Amino acid sequence: MDTVPNGNVEQKFQEMLAKLTATPAWSEKQQLELEMARDISTEMLRLAEVMRDGSVDMETCLTMLKYAKVLDFVMTTLASRRDIKPQTLRVIFKLAGLKVDEAYPG
């Protein structure tokens, strides 16, 4: 076993560590997507509170499910650092009955 430090391996490890711990630079479009996701989560919280207070009906449950699916799509796509096409996001939001931020491109 080699006990002498290998500078090349150490450098590669440090580069990999820097990539993993780097704070992502979000584009303006991605920041808008994050803000819209935050709005969805706020609306989901409001619905959950209504449901907790005893007003649970099928329509509220389905609305919550639609919001959860849209939120999952946006957050999963952003987390994987993939780009969301504006037209795709607009269609998904429209199908879920959500409003798209006016500043969002497309």
Image: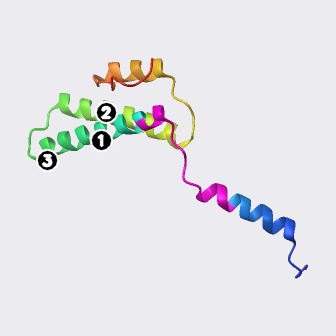
Disc 1, disc 3: CB below 8 Å? Answer: no
The one of 61 and 21 positioned closer to us in this rendering: 21
Question: Depth-wise, is mark 1 or mark 2 nearer the camera?
Answer: 1
State yes or no: residue 26 in magenta.
yes
Q: CA distance from mark 3 to mark 2?
A: 17 Å
Residue 12 versus residue 61 in the image, above or below:
below
Task: Answer few, some or many: residues within 10 Å of disc 1's Cα (few below 14, many 20 plus, some between 14 and 19).
Answer: some
The one of 58 and 67 positioned closer to us in this rendering: 67
Rendered residue at 55%/31% (across/down): 83
Q: Give the magenta range.
A: 17-31
Residue 74 is situated, as x and y percent measured from the top left of the image, at 44, 35
Q: Is residue 99 left or right of residue 10?
A: left
Residue 55 is situated, as x and y percent measured from the top left of the image, at 9, 38
Q: Give, as a three-letter code, the residue at label 1.
A: Ser
Q: Quadrant of residue 103?
A: top left
Rendered residue at 79%/68% (across/down): 10
View extreme (bottom): residue: 3
Residue 91 versus residue 5 in the image, above or below:
above
Q: Which residue is mark 2?
A: 67
Q: Give, as a three-letter code, the residue at label 2.
A: Tyr
Residue 69 is situated, as x and y percent measured from the top left of the image, at 38, 33
Q: Give, as a three-letter code, the residue at label 3.
A: Arg
Residue 27 is situated, as x and y percent measured from the top left of the image, at 51, 36
Task: Answer few, some or many: residues within 10 Å of disc 2's Cα (few below 14, many 20 plus, some between 14 and 19).
Answer: many
View extreme (left): residue: 54
Mark closer to the chain start, 1 or 2: 1
State yes or no: residue 3 in magenta.
no
Q: Which residue is mark 1?
A: 41
Rendered residue at 66%/59% (across/down): 18
